[in-house]
Amino acid sequence: MRRAADARRFFTRFVPVLLGSTALTFWSAPAAAAVDAATVQAAPWLAALAMGAAAAAAWVLGNRRARAAQADAIAAAARAEEVAASAARARAEAHSLRHLLGASADCALIWLRAGEAVNSFGVPEAARGRWLGPAGAREVDAAVATLRGGQETLERDITAADGRAFRLAGRTLNGAGVLLVHPLPAGAGPAEAALRDGLLAMLDAAPAPAWLKAPDGTLSYVNAAFVAAVGAASAEEARAQGLDILDSKARAAASSAEQGSGAFQGRVRAVARGQRRQLDVVEVAGPFGIAGLAVDVTDLEAAKAETGRTVAAHRRTLDQLTTAVAIFGADERLVFHNAAYERLFDFSPAFLDQRPSDGQILDNLRTRRKVPEQADFPAWRAQLREAYRALEPVNDWWHLPGGEMLRVVITPNAEGGVTYLFDDLSEHVALESRYNTLIRIQGETLDALAEAVAVFGSEGRLHLYNEAFLSLWALDAQTLGDKPHIDTVAALCRSRHGESAAFSRIRSVVTAMEHRETETLRLERADGRVLDGTAQPLPDGGTLVTFRDVTDSVKVERALIERAEALEAADKLKNAFVSHVSYHLRTPLNTLMGYADMLREGMAGPLSDRQRDYLDHMRQSSDQLRALIDDILDLASIDAGAMELDLAEVDVREMLESVAEAVHDQAEAAGVRLAMAVPQDAGRFTADPKRVRQILFNLIANAIAASPAGGTVTLGAERGQKAVLLTVRDEGAGVPQELADTLFERFESRNFNPHHRGVGLGLAIVRSFMTLHGGSVRVEPAAARQPGAHGTLATCVFPVTGSSHQEAA
C-alpha cells in the first residue's frame, strides 16, 4: 500500500513537468539551431515517453476509482506493485532525458519548476568560472535570471576569457526551463573568419608539421610540412591513411598526457623526411579534438652541442694561456676564470667556486695587497665598475706593492658584464732593462775590440758597427748613420780594397735567403795591409762581418815559411852530400887502413918499435874515423827514412855474451872488468840483431869510458810479459840531473873522462835505433833501481814482438 501511495505522489508531481520538458525541448531545438541532430532524433522517443506517462496517469486514476470500491484487496496490491514498477521506469527515463538534454551542448542548466534549484550538466557550477572566465560566468547567471524572471526564450553570444565564442539558448514553460551553452564554430564571425584564414595560411607555410584530429581520432587537417614529413603524396592521402608523425611509444605518451592534463609537450625522436630527427611536439586536446605542432630541433641540438664543445675548447684554450682571464656577468658576479688568473692572484679554488662578485674579489685582493695602493679605495673601485657601462675597452696599469707590474684590459661584453685580462709584465720589464744594459755593454765591448765588426740585418742594411770598423776603412759615423745597404758600404770601402771580389763574397752571405754558410776570406788591400775577414750568418737572419788586421802575422808567417824552405833545402843538400860523399870518404880510409896493416905485417920490410907504435896509433884513429863515418851515415839514413830493420829472433844470452867478448880487449885496455847478470829464462825476442849489437856496443863503450880503473861494467837482462829489458851499468861518477835531458842530443859529449871524449853521436844513434824497434831507452842513476849502488844505469826496452817505426830521429 505504501508503494502504491508513493507511485501516486510521483506521477501526480512529475508527469506534468516531464510533459512540459518534452515540449520545451521541441521548442528549443528548431528555434535556436543550437540543439544538435541527436536531440532532434530523440524527440519521437520523448513523445512516446510522454504518451506512456499519460497512459500511466489514466491507469492510476482508474485505480483510484477502483480503490474507493476496495472490492478486491489482492488485485489492488498487484496493481500497486505494477505502479511501483512503472514509477521506477519513469525515474530512469527522466534521468536519461536529463542527459539527452545536455548532450548537444558543452553545458546545460535545467530547472523543473519555479523556485527550484538549477541543475548543471556538462560543466559543474564550481568550474564554470574557470571554463568561461568570471565575465562569462556572470553572463550565464544573468541569462538564467532573465529566463526565470518570465522571459520565455533567450539567445545571446558571449566570449570566454581565452577568446572562445559561445551561444546561450534558453526556453521556459510553466516555470520550468533550460539554458544550453553551445561553443560557436570557428569563423562564426568576420574576425573569427579572418583569424582562421590567417592561421591556416600560416600553418600551411610553416616548416613545422601541424595537424588536427577530430574527436573520433581521424585527421581533419594537415599542413604541407606534415605531408612532407610523413612522406605522403598529398594531404588527402595523409588524412585517408591516418598517417602519424609520432611512433607508437611517443603516441602512447601523448595520449596519456592528454587524458590527464589535456595537453602533451615533450621532445621525441621521429622519422621525418626519411631521416631520424628530434622534434619538440605540442598537442592539445579539447572539444575540437586534438591539435598538434612539431618543431624540428635536430639542427638546434647539434648547434647547442657544437656550441658546448666550442665553449669547452675555448675554456681549455684559455686555461693554457699565461694571460689571466676573468669574465663577470651582467650581475657583476664571476662567470669564468682560467688557471692563470687563479695562479696570478693566488686565489683559493673554494672562494672562486662561490661565484663572488667583482667587489668581493677586489676587497679580497686589497686585503692581501694584490692591488695598487689607493688613497680612496672605494672611489677607485667605483671607477673600475664604470667599465660595466662603457662602450670601449679600458686599459690600465697596476703597480703592486710587491714590485709586480700588471697590464689590465677591461672589455665590456655584448650580453652584459666585462672581461678582465691581466698580463704580468714584471719579468718583461726586468728583461727589457737587462736587455738595454746588455746592449750598452755590447756596444762598449765592440768599441773596445781590435777587430772591425759590422752587423747587417736580414734586409742587407748595416745595423751595428764599432770604432775599429770606421778606422780600418776610413769611414765616419755620419756616413753610416742612415743604415746603408751592403752595396753602399762596399762602394765606400772600394777606395781601400780596390776591385777585389772579397765584398762580393760577403754580399752573397748577407743577401742569401737560404743555404747561408760561413764565408772566410783574406783580403790584401792596395796599401799593403792584409785582412782576414769572416761573414757569419746569425740566427735572426742577419750577418756578422768581422775584419782582423793580420799584416804582421802574415809577414812573420812568410818569413818562417822562407826559413823552413831554406832548412828543407839544406837538409836535402846534407842528405845528398852524405849519400854522395860517403863512398869517397870510406874508399881512401879503407886504402889507408889496408896499407897500415900491410906495413905492420912487415910486407914492406922490418919495422922499428917506434914505427910499429906509429902504425898502431894510425890504425886506432882509422877505426875511430870509420866508426864516426858509420854513425853519421846511419843517422842520415834514419833521418831520410831509408833505414829498414832486418827483424829476426834474438837470443838474449847469446847476444850479451857475443857483445861482451867483442869489447873484452877494449875493457881490458881500460882496466875495467865485465860482468854478466842474465837470468836463465831471458829467452828470445824479435829485433834486428845487427842494430841490437850496435846499441849495446855504444852503451858499453860509454860505460867503459865512464868507469874508473878497476871498476866493473855489468850487462844485465830482464823479461816481462810484453817487453825485454837490456841494461848496462857502470860504476862511474854518474850523470848530473841537469844534464840528463840532453844526453841523447846529437854532438853532445857528456863524458867526463879526459882520456876518452867522443863526438856525442853514440847515445843519439841508440835512441834512434830503439825508436825504430818501437822501444825506448833511458839513462838514470843506478841507485834508482838498486838502492846503495853507484854509477849510471842505461836501460833499453824492446817489445817481445818486433815492430818497425820509420820516424826514429
Image: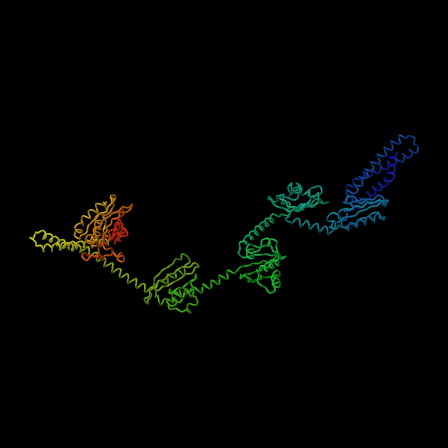
Residue 6, above or below 443: above
Q: Quadrant of the C terminus?
A: bottom left
**Horizontal side of residue 315 vs 552, given as left or right:** right
Task: Name the quarter where the N terminus is drawn.
Answer: top right
Q: Measured along the vertical axis of the image, is residue 332 above or below residue 214? A: below
Please tell me which residue lies in front, 723 or 230: 723
Q: Is residue 431 visible?
A: yes
**x and y, in percent, of residue 632 in the image:** 20, 55
The image's colouring method is: rainbow
**x%, y% of residue 491?**
38, 66
Displayed quadrant of residue 387 = bottom right
* 355 sits left or right of 75 in the view: left
Residue 31 is left or right of residue 245, and the answer is right
Task: Tell me: 474 left or right of 49.
Answer: left
**Residue 237 at least partly seen:** no
Q: Nearer the viewer, residue 553 or 487?
A: 553
- Residue at 73 percent across and 52 percent down: it is 191
The quadrant in which residue 38 appears is top right
Of all residues, the one furthest to the front in this rendering is 788
The total number of labels drawn is 0
Residue furthest right in the image: 69
Spot occupied by residue 162 in the image (x, y as percentages of width and height) = 73, 50
